[in-house]
Amino acid sequence: MPEKDVGKVYHVVITDTIGLSDSIGLSKDTIESAFAATGSLAKYTHYYQEAFKIVEKASIAGSMNASDISTLQKTLGEWHKWNEEWNTNIIELTRKNESEKLKTIDKSINEKIPEMLRMITVIYDKTAGPKAWNQIEGFFNVKSSDKEKTTVFKGTSHSDLLELLLKWIETKNGEVKLFGQIIHGPRESGIDIIAQTSEGNEKVGIQLKNNDDVKAEDFTTKIKAQVTDSRKHQLRGLVVIFAANMTDNSIEAKVRGIVSEFSQMKETLIKVVPPENTFTIIDEIITRATL
């Protein structure tokens, strides 16, 4: 069941509970806390179901050894137990008008989610292996240009850059052939383009950050959150492409800083394309179009 549908189910449950408890007069804080907790539980359930589905497929296909399967199934059993307990407690605490305890449950659920995401990544690595990602990552290994050339990104819109990038992805020949789709929007979940291999069995997310994105005060916080959100797409990996003016010292410091942080992340497969390399990509497609 998709996450949004799971969320609807839990919200219906809580709505029914509130109706039953109307005689004791639920506070506004309790109602808000109950809906917050059910929303978090919906996300938790979504990731549990995703992990369960992958492990089940791996078990049937024999793409993971028996010891790993056994360990993962034990963990999934614990996740399921937590899920059931939280669901029961949310309903009971809502009936009892216990807003603070509901907030504690909401916090506990959200503390568990990063652990789930790390495990899902590990499962993907064990079942698919690094070969496919290495091929896709190599697709973006291009020659670096002089940073002075990145000044062109000062006046280039995000949408124009996405169109050029998509054209480059679909016309470039490499170890793999990629086909992309722009999905940028208010609900993008940390992704601008979804690209798949010609066989359709591997999917990579592409996030583009232009000059205005990097200049924003919340740039670092936002991009880290988007990396987490991108996992909702069940990606083999994430490519973060920067198109910003590196002659601006503050922008250069931000980009270099986040590139360093991403290089230290171990639970997520991330390929970073600095602005100097992005210029090479954009210049190649523009040059090709004018020939």
Image (spheres, helix red, strand yellow):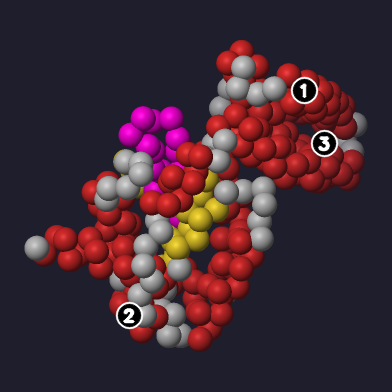
What residue is at 62 percent from the left and 17 percent from the top?
62
- Residue 149's disc is 2
Q: Nearer the viewer, mark 1 or mark 2?
A: 1
Name the residue tied to disc 3.
Answer: 26
| Residue 279 or residue 80, whichever sits in front | 279
| Residue 94 or residue 119, whichever sits in front | 119
* 280 inside magenta stretch: no
Name the residue tied to disc 1.
Answer: 67
Residue 7: horizontal and vertical position, in percent? 63, 31
Residue 40 in view of the camera? no
Q: Which residues are magenta?
A: 190-207
- As helix, strand or loop, the secondary structure at mark 1 comes to helix
Split into 4 quadrants, where in the image is the N terminus?
top right
Q: Nearer the viewer, mark 1 or mark 3?
A: 1
Q: Nearer the viewer, mark 2 or mark 3?
A: 2
- As helix, strand or loop, the secondary structure at mark 3 comes to loop
What residue is at 50 percent from the left and 60 percent from the top?
272
What residue is at 24 percent from the left and 64 percent from the top?
284
- Of marks 2 and 3, which one's residue comes earlier in the chain? 3
Q: Residues within 10 Å of mark 2 (few under 14, many from 20)?
A: some
Residue 109 in view of the camera? yes
Q: Disc 1 residue type?
A: Ser
Residue 214: horizontal and vertical position, in percent? 49, 71
Q: Disc 2 residue type?
A: Lys
Residue 176: horizontal and vertical position, in percent? 35, 41
Q: Disc 3 residue type?
A: Leu
Q: Quadrant of residue 282?
A: bottom left
